[in-house]
Amino acid sequence: MTESLVNLETTPHTAREADPFPVKGMDAVVFAVGNAKQAAHYYSTAFGMKLVAYAGPENGSRETASYVLTNGSARFVLTSVIKPTTDHGRFLAEHVAEHGDGVIDLAIEVPDVRAAYAYAVEQGARGLDEPYEVKDEHGTVVLAAIATYGQTRHTLVERTGYDGPYLPGYVAVEPIVAAPAKRTFQAIDHCVGNVELGRMNEWVAFYNKVMGFTNMKEFVGDDIATEYSALMSKVVADGTKKVKFPINEPAIAKKKSQIDEYLEFYGGPGVQHIALASNDIVATVRTMRAAGVQFLSVPDSYYDTLGEWVGDTRVPIDELRELKILADRDEDGYLLQIFTKPVQDRPTVFFEIIERHGSMGFGKGNFKALFEAIEREQEKRGNL
């Protein structure tokens, strides 16, 4: 399976009275992993998520095992292959062998799957699964899927009136561990994709045309550059900004950028990181760090002048310094953010924790400090 864009230039992008591709929000981030049972334990204990549903051999899924974890509205689905017997199972097994643990699906909830799929395909999307229904005693869910960059897909989900734990075929299960006293995060803020050099604008055009997303932010040139490496990024979002997809590509520089490293070790384009929205980043970082999550570190010198340009924040500068949390301010407010190290052996997928106070930005003022921190980790791995 390879990426494909079809007829992106054949239909003019005209103004419309209504959103041509309305969305309700992110439905799930779906991972293909080598061992879903162990991954479910990791995200339960280290990220404070709650296991809520399962599908496997015990309830009729002979080929795969899938664990569904939630935290607020954020939902992760972790799937591994037990014994591949179909094209789908073989694809999942080959995906893990080639890419390691990674995101295969950014599922989006929509009010009308049939209308959304028809619009997307009409505008040039490559359809993977035409709309179909799945049912059980909890109701009916309508699903369809379209392709995006690399081997990533967007499953379109219409679950109005469905009250099961996830989807038909899944059963409710007990959590692996007791949830922390305070929820670590509440929602998925944005999901970042890395694509090859020269492909960023192509995929931005894809989201503009196929899903009616608009351009939200753009970072080029010196915006995201250090002495050694650089990248370019553009952010697309639906009209409500509930679904935000930054798209990154490498830029020519002295040494290998984090995007180059990702593309090399992932084996092509894919989802680089998932940002998780927290309303108390201090408590989140303390809880996750105590559970063994490793975060990127920035030098103390970053904090020496932080207060001069970021102003007052909910968290005192000394506490930001202690926890290595970054801060940024724009015309709408400020944000606090921190990034984990990669959560698997390959230097690919990682996570961001973000707390927003008005700002809808992505931490532009932190780019240099952040990417220098990433470069220090690349150098340790011998990949800079």
Image (tube, rainbow, N blue to C red):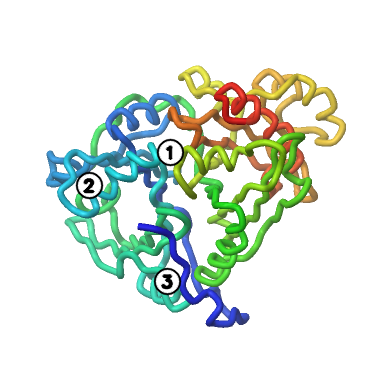
- Residue 355 horizontal/vertical position (percent): 63, 38
Residue to which mark 2 is pinned: 170
Residue 116's disc number: 3
Q: What residue is shown at x 72% (from left), y 21% (from top)?
A: 321
User: Of the residues tagged 3 and 2, which is closer to the observer?
Assistant: 3
Give the residue type that dot 3 points to.
Answer: Ala
* Mark 1 → mark 2, Cα distance in angstroms: 18 Å
Residues marked 1 and 2 touching at CB (< 8 Å) = no
- Residue 282 horizontal/vertical position (percent): 61, 26
Quadrant of the image for the N terminus?
bottom left
User: Of the residues tagged 1 and 3, which is closer to the observer?
Assistant: 3
Closer to the camera, 270 or 308? 270
- Residue 310 horizontal/vertical position (percent): 81, 36
* For marks 1 and 2 on the same chain, the one whose residue lies earlier in the sequence: 1
The image quarter containing residue 229 is top right
Residue 71's disc number: 1
* For marks 1 and 3 on the same chain, the one whose residue lies earlier in the sequence: 1
Closer to the camera, 201 or 25? 201
Q: What secondary structure is found at the residue carrying circle 2?
A: loop
Residue 197's disc number: none
- Residue 60 horizontal/vertical position (percent): 12, 46
* Image: 180 above or below 226: above
Give the residue type that dot 2 points to.
Answer: Tyr
Are there few (<14), some (14-19), or many (20+) residues within 10 Å of tag 2? Answer: many
Asked if residue 125 lies left or right of residue 97, the reply is right
Asked if residue 176 lies left or right of residue 235, the reply is left
* Image: 59 above or below 341: below
For this orientation, the residue located farthest to the right is: 308
